[in-house]
Image (tube, rainbow, N blue to C red):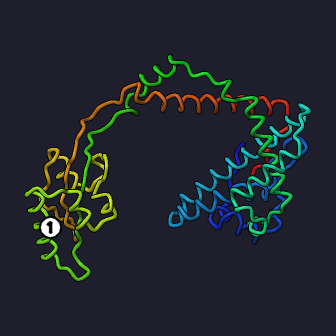
Amino acid sequence: MKWRIRTWWALLGAGAALAAEPRLLNTVVVIVDQEIITLKDVSQYIAPAIEVLMRTYAGQPEVLRQKIEEAQREGIEQLVERKLILHEFERAGYNLPESLVEDRVKERIRERYGGDRAALTRSLQSQGLTYEAFRRRIREDFIIGAMRARNIGSDKIIVSPHKIEKYYAENLDKFRIRDQIKLRAIMLTAGAGRSRESTRALAAEILAKLREGADFAEMARVYSEDTYRPQGGDRGWIERGDLRKELADAAFGLKPGQPSEVIEVGDTFWILLVEDARANQIRTLPEVHDEIFNTLRAEEQSRLNREWIERLKAKSFVRYFAS
C-alpha cells in the first residue's frame, strides 16, 4: 500500500487543510471489512502528533512534509489494526461490561481533567469531538488492550539467557563508553555592565583562590553565571563531543583534581575542574543485562504483533485507496 499525502495538507497541517476543504472530510482512505476509514478519521487520530511536528520542524518545510507523510502512513496502519482487532473481538463473541467502560471513563476524566467534566467538554469541542466519541474511544482502547494481552502478552514472550548473551556479543559497540570525565565548571560572562578586562580579572582572582585550596563547588555556587550554578557547576559525566572544542581540549588534558587555566571563549571565561575520568571501555554484560532484556522483549512483542495482525488481515477484507 502506498499513500502519498497531498502537499497542501503536509504544509498547512491536517486540521487547517480539512477545515478549508470540507468536501475532503469523507474521502475514503481504507475499507476494513464493511467499515470505512476516512480522511477525517486519520486527521483526528494523528492531530496531536501533527501539532508536535509543526512546532518542531516549523523552519524546515521539506523535513516537515516528510514527517507528516510518515505520521499519516503510521496513523492509517494503526487505525487499520484497531479495526481488525475490534472485529476479531466481535467475531469471538466476547463481551465487555459497560460498568468497566464507565469506570475507565471516570478514571480518565480524573487523570486528565481533574474530574472536571466541563473541562473535558471544552477540550472535546476544540477537537471537534463529542462525548459519545470520547467514550467510544475509551471502550475501544480497553478492548484492544485486552486483546493484545490475550494474543501477544508478556506470558507469550520468552527471552532466554542465550539470546541476551548473543545480542551482547553481536552489539558490543552499543555498550561502549567513550573517554569520559566528571566535570565541574565556573563560567563568567562579559557584558551587562562588566567589561572583558574586569571579567578576566575576576576569573583570575577565582582561580587564585582555587589554587589556595578554596572548594570548587562552593566557588561555583557563588560566582558561576550559568544554569549549573545551583549544582556547584556539576556537569556530571560527559564525553568530548559534549563540549566546545576549546573547552574539550582543555578539560580532557587535565588530571583529576586539577583546575584549568582561565579559558576564553567569545565573551565567556571558564575555569574547569575534572573530578574523575574513565577511559574508553565496554560495559559488562551484567551491567547491561536488563537493558538488553527489555530491548529483546520489545522486539519479540513487535514481531508477534505483526504476525497476529497479518493473520487478522488474511481473514478480513482490507482495501487501501491511494491518492
Q: Residue 117: give x, y in percent of width and height.
A: 78, 65
Residue 212 screen position, x and y as percent? 7, 58
Instruction: Measuring from the top left, give residue 251's x and y in whole percent.
Output: 19, 51
Displayed quadrant of residue 151: top right
Q: Which of 156 and 245 is in front in this view?
A: 156
Which one is in front, 270 or 54? 270
Q: Residue at x 54, y 32 (%)?
A: 294
Q: How crowded is mark 1: few (under 14 residues within 10 Å), some or many (20 or more)?
A: many
The quadrant the N terminus occupies is: top right
User: In the image, is 19 to the left or to the right of 195?
Assistant: right
The x, y position of residue 314, in whole percent, is: 81, 30
Q: Which picture quadrant has residue 246?
A: bottom left
Q: Which residue is drawn at 67% across and 47% down?
A: 74
Q: Is mark 1 on a helix, strand or loop?
A: helix
| 110 to the left or right of 213 | right
User: Which residue is the extreme one toward the top?
Assistant: 162
Q: Nearer the viewer, residue 174 or 310?
A: 174
How many circles with numbers are drawn on the protein?
1
Quadrant of residue 85 within the rendered picture: top right
- Say left or right for 296 vs 37: left
Return the residue nearer the eye: 22 or 216: 216
Q: Residue at x 20, y 48 (%)?
A: 274
Q: What residue is shown with label 1?
A: 203
Amino acid under disc 1: Ala
